[in-house]
Amino acid sequence: MFKIFVDRGGTFTDIVVVTDNQKIIDSISTENKRFYIFKISNKKWIILYKILSENPIKYQDAVIQGIRDVIGVNTHGLLDTKQLEVIKMGTTVATNALLERKGAHTVLLITKGFKDALKIGYQNRPNLFALNIILPSILYKHVIEIDERYDVNGHELKKINHEQVYQDLKQVYDQGIKSCAIVFMHSFRFPHHENQVSKIAQEIGFTQVSLSHQVSPLMKLVARGDTTVVDAYLSPILRRYVDQVLSQLPDVRLMFMKSDGGLVDADQFHGKDSILSGPAGGIVGAVKTSLRAGFKEIITFDMGGTSTDVAHFNGEYERQIDNKIAGTRIRVPMLNIHTVAAGGSSILFFDEFSFRVGPESAGADPGPACYRRGGPLTVTDANVMVGKIRPSYFPTIFGSQENLPLDKEIVSQKFTQLAQKFCRFTGHLTKPEKVAYGFILIAVQNMANAIKKVSLQKGFDITKYTLTSFGGAGGQVCCLIADTLGIKTIFLHPYAGVLSAYGMGLADLCVIEEKSVEQLLTQELVSQLNTLSNELEIKGNNKLNSKTFQTKNEVKKKVNLKYQGTDSTLLINLLDKSETIVKLFEEEHQSRYGFIQSNKPLIVESISVEVIQKMETPEEPLINRIRSLNESPNYLEIVQIFTHDSWHDSPIYRREDLQSQDNIKGPAIIVEKISTIIVEPNWKATLTEYNHLILKRY
């Protein structure tokens, strides 16, 4: 049997397979360059595999082809889906559709008089002094104003004219628009009109009907409307992709990662939940593996080619409700992930006055200068220049024949030219390696600032935290990042290069039910909220248990609280006594903002109930020590790296040659099949029995 976890990214699709099939292991062991195999028990293995997300000449879909490659079925052969127990996926399909504005043609139905409400938005000005305001493009093609209205107390002021609604919708439908978003005033409390119009749309034949009271049952027309439009815009794209996968994998349980860090069955996966599907898997993978390793206070650090994602964890996942992605407001729970445009392919600039890293990226094509495609200097090239990336230990996949190593000569040539240019404009003579190291420090500072934003700026002392580093480029700079922030412990999992995919396999089924409240916090209201939370819990349990065996689920109940007259909410545990809730709110407010206002009453904006169903997860691989404790690991060679403004002799170790309890003092390089780890001076790396690499500053 096979359990398959997939992260379908923009460039690569990462696949992690858990199997007990000895024949498959024996057959792919001969292709060790393509597959990485870890034994996790006597009769179970984990297979790691990377495949290009887009290769239309060779295959239609990377996920299906990746499964075929692992199982050993050619492109035209039949897949035995009975062997596939479950597939858990994170996907950027909807994210890319939103970024590129390639979603479904959508019509917006909104209360009469509010035709331009979503276009006007909140009139925020991100660039205060910009004279030419460039608004993000709207997602809907047409707007239909519906002459309907409830007042704030639920009194029907204007009934629906069914014939007029039918005519307006039919006219749009005949133009080829099959997706609609329905957003009415006060419908989050009084949804009757939305339901009436929904029935008309379904009768006409609309294939996607998104109702605001279901998509985002909270106050604020603009945010609720934007979220509903996003759902209507992206859900058809997602459904098309899901149907495409299921057509080739019939009777296989297919699950997707949501933006809130929980899994959901394919038929319940909607556009509004898919925006951070891929990055969420990385956060879950980093947190779950760190907890297994014994770390509880965690900063996750995912450095890829184009950008770096960071997040904070201290006992529970941090989520935010109000989000803005690609210029679009989305009001659903999402993991609080901060992204900065600094990655391995970030381009290096010198503008005659200062050095700058990014935000522009060389991408995969042409890629960094060392990729032999005529690309510009990047952070990766800087690491090549200072000796931290060694071409002899990097895959030989470059050049026209894809059989050449990284081009170190062109990197050295370009940095020499840049050093000469720097001297010409500043009058300061400097060496190429110093220029390269300076760029690395700028990139490190950019990424460290991103970590400060999710931690220090919220009142957390991260010097006691563990930095969990993953992604293709994380290991190259993690010690420098930790030094900048005062962090003394770094954790690197053996699957760090594909941790987003592995995170799909470690995640739990999760449903978050919300309800708008907007009332003063009193003891009487707390009693009502507990009753309401029980109703939401039942609703969540019904969704989770509809396709799975009945089980005892974990439940987390919270309320969004704010001071009366303010707009900033904090998520606080729902307890039995209002005094205890107030105390928790004030402690969190003091930590976050540095003050409290005891004389101000509190408003409960909304209630949130998270229902979690635990799932079976893979075990960690165990490694044994064969050498005596006094015997140190053998290094491959000693090379020089430039760090901390000087050259250092640094041994190179291969990670698979290391054994449990091995210690390596920096400076040193540890090479893996899918990444490179730099142990900086004053750092020591220790390998545990679970193949976890723990770096500590001494």
Image: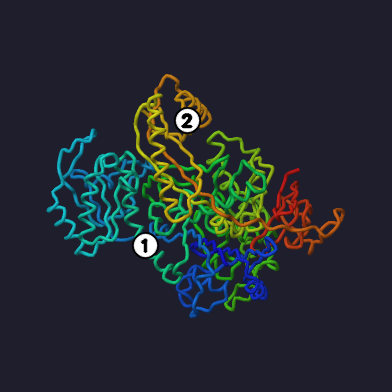
Residue 575 disc label: 2
- Read off the residue under disc 1: 237
Q: Quadrant of the N terminus?
A: bottom right
Q: Position of residue 197 (x, y in %)?
A: 21, 51
Residue 268 position by quadrant: bottom left
Secondary structure of the residue carrying tag 2 is loop
Q: Farthest residue toward the front?
A: 550
Secondary structure of the residue carrying tag 1 is helix
Indicate the amino acid at tag 2.
Leu
> Quick check: 78 above or below 296?
below
The colour style of the image is rainbow
Q: Quadrant of the C terminus?
A: top right
Residue 182 seen from this side: yes
Q: Nearer the viewer, residue 197 or 314?
A: 197
Query: Which residue does the image show at 84% across and 59% down from the upper left?
Result: 627
Indicate the amino acid at tag 1.
Ile
Q: CA distance from mark 1 to mark 2?
A: 41 Å
